[in-house]
Image (cartoon, rainbow, N blue to C red):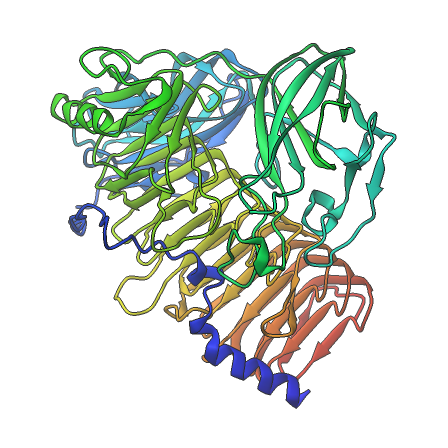
Amino acid sequence: MREYRNHILLMALLSGLVACGGGGGSDAPSSANPPPVVEPTPEPEPQPEVTAPSVPETDDTSQQGTRYQAEDQFISGAVTKSESYVGGFKKAGDRVIFSVNSNSANTSAITIRYANIATTEQPLALYLNGLKIQDVKFPSTGDATWASHSINLALRAGVNTVSVQADNQENGDVFVGSLYVANGAEMPERGKGAVYTTFEAELQNTNAEVLAFDTTYKTLASEASGRRAVQLKNTGDYVELSSEAAASGLVLRYAIPDSASGEGTVSTLGLYVNGERQDLAVTSKYAWVYGAFPYSNNPSDGEAHRFYDESAYHVSIPAGATVRLQKDAQDTAAYYTLDLIELEQVPAPIEQPEGYINLAEAPYLADTSGTADATSLLNDAINDAKSAGTGVYMPAGQYSITNRVSLNGVHIQGAGIWHTRIMGRNGKGGFFATGSNTRLTDFKIIGDATSRRDSEDHAAIEGNFGTNSLVQNIWVEHMKVGAWIAKGTDGLLMINGRVRDTYADGFNFHQGVLRSQVSHFNVRNSGDDAFAMWSENGTSATNTANVFSYNTAQLPMLANGFAIYGGDSNKLLNNIAMDTVVSSAGIALSHRFNPKPFSGTTVVANNSLYRTGGWDYGWNTSFGALWVFTDGAPITGAIKIDHLTIKDAVYDGVLVSYEQAVDALQLSNSQIDGAGSMGIKLAVAEGELTLENVTVANTTDVALDNWGMNIIEEGSNSGF
C-alpha cells in the first residue's frame, strides 16, 4: 500500500512535465503566427436594485404545450433569477436564453409569460437560434399580475434557442417567468438529445466477425463504442440494418489499415439501399497515431492506436429501407472495422438573413468549392459587417481557411452543419474571438490535422468572447481542439453540436471563464479531455459559476469525459460519459495541472457513466469512473455529487486519491452497478465523506475500501 502511495507521489510531482488531461490541451499559438491582441473585458458596473413583481409567476392552465421555466434557463449580463422568474434587463445584451426541444421541424406557437411593472409598455428583443425575429413591446401589467405574449416561430428538429434580451435599450421593469411551446418536447433526462439515430454495428444483422468486448488499450475493440465492433474481412461480409425513418445524411465510424508511411490509405465500401449500391469513400488519413505522447504520425515509432475516423455522406434512404454496408471485390482495404452508423434527415439549407453580407456574392465572391483561399475575403466581409452593424452569411459550399479568423461583435451564419463547410488547411484555420456579442451558428469546421501539434495548430473556436456571445449548432472535425475559451469570457452559451476526432480537447474553459455554459454537445474521440474546465494557476483568473450540461462524451483518449481542474462553484449537470480509453475517468475533479484550488461548492448532479475509468501506463495505476484527485494539496471546497449512475466501471467506481484531505465530499442518491475493482476506494488518509442513499453492487473486489476518511452515513445505503 505504501509503495503504491509513494509511486503516486513521485508521478504527481512529475505530472507538470506530462502534457495530459487539462494541460494536454494547451492551445499555445505558434510564435510565427501570433493571435490577435485581445482587449481585456471591463468589469461590469454595479447595477441599482429594481422593484420586483409582488406575486410569483404560476402555471397558466390555458396555455398548451411544453412549459420551460425561466429560472432554469441560461442567463447572462445583469439578469438575475428568483424562484419563479428572471429579471434585470438593464443594459444591451442582458438576456435569458430558453433551450427548447422539438421532435420535428414545425411552426409552433410560442407564449412568453411576463410581468411589466412599469406604467408604460416596455420593449425587449426576441431571437430564435441566434437571429433576431422582432422587438416585442410588453404592455404594463402592474406588479401583481402576469400576462402572456404569443408568436408563431419556425422551430428546427432538436434543440432550439429562444432568447429574450435587451438590445439597445435599458429595461429593468420587464420580468420573464416561463415560455410555453405548443409543439415542444421535454429535454432528455441526461446527455445530448440527438437528431440522428445511432445503430451499433455489432447489434445489427451481420455475417462477419463480431469483435469481442475488450477494454485492453491499443485494441480495435477498446476504442469502439460499447467496446465491440464488426470487422469485414472477406468479400461479401456485411452489416445490415433497417432504417427507422427516412434519412438523407449518414455518418460512419470505421477503421481501415494505415499505410506503411503513416500518411493513410483510401478505399471504398459498398452502401446498399434496398439492393442498390453506391460507393462510400473511406480513408485512414486522419486516424492511427504512434509512439509516446504527444504521439506521431510515424509507424516506425510503434504503439499504434487511435484507429477510428468518421465520414459523413449525403444519401437517400426511404423509411423502412434495408441498408447494408458490404465489402465487395472492388473494396480494396484489407479489413473494415465498423463501429456505428448514424442516420438523420438533413434539413434544407438556411437562407440568407435579411441585411446580412453574403460571402459568395460580389464584391467578395468567395470560392465555394474550397479550392481558392477564402481567408482574406472572409476577414474583409467581417470588417464590413462590423461597420454596418450586421452579420456575414456563408451559403452552402466549402471555404478554405488558412489562418485564424478574428471577430468581435459580428455574427457568422452558415447554411447548416451539413451544407456550409469551413476547411482548415495545414493545421490552421478556425475562429478567434476578441470581444463581446459574437455569434457563430450553423456550419461545420473541418481541419486536416493528422497528429497533435500543440504549438503549431489552431483550435476550431478559441479566444475571449467577452460578454453575451453565442455559439450554436457547430460541427467540428479533425482540428487540434474543438473550443478553447479564454479569460475575459463572461456569459457565453455554446449549445447544440458535435465535436469529433480532435487531437486534443473537445472543450476547454481555460482560466477565468465566468458564468458560461456548454450544453447539448456530443464529443467523440477527442485526444484529451472531452469537456474540461481548467483554472490554471499563475494568474488571478479562476473559472467561476460555469456549467456543462446535457452533453455526451464518448471515447476520449488520454484523458477524461468531463474534468474540473479547480475553480469556484462550477457544475456538471445531466451529462453522459462512456467508454473512456486510457489514462482517464468518466468524471475527474482534480487538483492536477496546477489549478486554482476548489472553492465555493462544486456540483455534479444527474450524470451517468458507462464503462468508464482507465489504466495510466505512465503512473502504472488505474483511475476510477469518478475520480477525485488532490494532487499535492487538500481539497477544501465543498463537492456535492448527487444522482450519479455508474455502470460497469472498468476499475473502481469511485476513487478518491491521494494522501491529501478532501474536507467536504458528499455522494448521495447514487448507484454503482458493476466495477472491475472496488465500488468506492478512498485512497486518502483524512477528510470527510457523507454517503446518503448510495448503492454498490456487482464489484470484482470489495465494495468499500477506506484508508482513513471519516465517513458519515445518512439515509439508506446498501452493498457495503
Task: Provide residue 396's location: percent of width, then percent of height.
Answer: 40, 16
- Quadrant assignment, res 349: top left
| Residue shown at the point (36%, 30%) measured from the top left | 176
Task: Provide residue 539's location: percent of width, then percent of height.
Answer: 26, 66
Viewer-closest of 168 and 364: 364
| Residue shown at the point (47%, 69%) measured from the top left | 18
Q: Residue furthest bottom?
A: 2
Q: Residue furthest left?
A: 387
Quadrant in which the N terminus is drawn: bottom right
Q: Is residue 255 left or right of residue 422?
A: right
Q: Is residue 67 left or right of residue 645?
A: left
- Quadrant assignment, res 698: bottom right
Viewer-closest of 58 and 313: 313
Residue 489 visible, this orientation = yes
Q: Relative to 673, say whether 413 is above or below.
A: above
Quadrant in which the C terminus is drawn: bottom right
Task: Provide residue 15's location: percent of width, then percent of height.
Answer: 47, 73
Q: Residue furthest front?
A: 260
- Quadrant assignment, res 586: bottom right
Task: Provide residue 320's location: percent of width, then percent of height.
Answer: 76, 13
